[in-house]
Amino acid sequence: MSVFTHPDFDAHEQVVFCHDQASGLKAIIAIHDTTLGPALGGCRMFPYVNDDEALRDVLRLSRGMTLKSSLAGLKLGGGKAVIIGDPHTGKSPALLHAMGDFVDSLGGRYITAADSGTGEPEMQAFAQRTRHVIGATPRATLDGSIASGDPSPSTALGVFVGLKAAVRYRLGRDDLIGLKVAIQGVGHVGLGLARHLKEAGAQLWVSDIFDANVRTAVEELGACAVRPHDIYGLDVDVFAPCAMGGILNAETLTTLRAPVIAGAANNQLASPEIGAELQRRNCLYAPDYAINAGGIIDVYYQRVGGSASHSDAHIRGIADTLRQIFERAAASGECTSVIADRLALERLQGGEQLQATPHRLHA
């Protein structure tokens, strides 16, 4: 398996393959760019079909983190880690300690945090072996209470304020009462988004590959359960992808009906051409790494010691960033994904420019 000729290799600074025979750990850490600071990105655990699928994911995700941190105005680079394995059955203290050792071996060039398939317990295990981890200790929240270091509530909040900005821009609505939203994936972030939407008066349709997640959304929020392959074709106002990437593609676009796409998933576009097609269809796409930046903003403030109020204000600024993207896209006639890439690259000023074009950098 070649890395340098891989279609998703994008001048990455470092790609490390991690294997610990004793614990069974198989993982990949990718550092995309450290122009603005050390690479920070979550550690995902997923039962990838094969190693190439895992490599593709970590390359795309780490590149997306560079853009996400830049667009959010953070002094951080882009990185990501993936562990190949079932997050429900494949964890052990030995495996998590081995992963912590691998993170530590990079000497702080990569800082890890929670992601899909990992959370505070995994970060605490990593922290026993490395200090280059965020989200392992409790912290104060905006209301003064103590919460875990899990950044998923902040990701959900950012997606919610971003979704509201998209609805206001595309549909001309200032409230969400009666708004119809289809949420694909109701894990930690998707369920958090669903709670915000329910409180705002929206109607919810949900799907997930895990039945327990759907049951929680149905029982707690009164959401309507939908089979995974039916979620795209619903007659709703907003489609909110909050699961895995690549779900906006030639096949799903044949049934997708929502005029607004605003969700938490990374790498939503299967290819840059899909962004242009959405623009042609007058479907407003909120670029993923712009709208889902709440988590990285959260962990950044955990790292630098900023207050909960500063973090909250920064997260709510996602709405302003999206409005700027939407307005520039409308003025130029270009799709929102291209505008987001351009803005992210503009904000990398002050350091060496990335050795890639906006088109190649799209995550």
Image (tube, rainbow, N blue to C red):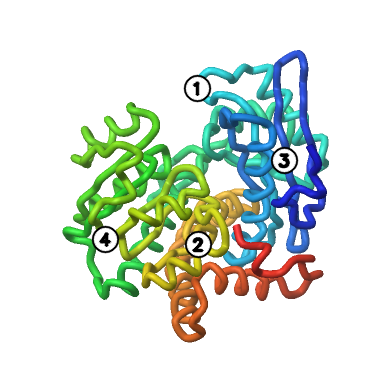
Numbered circle sitting on residue 181: none
- Closest to the camera, between mark 3 and mark 2, is 2
What separation in Å lies between label 1 and label 2 (alpha carbons)? Answer: 33 Å
**Residue assigned mark 1:** 88
Give the x, y percent position of residue 168: 31, 72
**Residue assigned mark 4:** 237
The correct choice, above or below, for 351 with respect to 119 in the image is below
In the foreground, 177 or 279? 279
**Residue assigned mark 3:** 132
Q: Report the residue at 37% width, 57% height from top.
A: 160
- Closest to the camera, between mark 4 and mark 1, is 4
Q: Quadrant of the C terminus?
A: bottom right
Give the x, y percent position of residue 328: 50, 81
Instruction: Check disc 4 and report its element: helix, strand or loop.
Output: loop
Residue type pointed to by label 4: Asp
Q: Residue 239's image quarter?
A: bottom left
Residue type pointed to by label 1: His
**Residue assigned mark 2:** 274
Mark 1 Cα within 10 Å, few/some/many (few <14, many 20+)? few
What separation in Å lies between label 3 and label 1 (alpha carbons)? Answer: 24 Å
Residue type pointed to by label 3: His
Give the x, y percent position of residue 272: 57, 63
- Asked whether the beta carbons under mark 3 and mark 1 sit within 8 Å of each other, the answer is no
Q: Earlier in the sequence, mark 4 or mark 2?
A: 4
Instruction: Check disc 2 and report its element: helix, strand or loop.
Output: helix
Q: Earlier in the sequence, mark 4 or mark 1?
A: 1
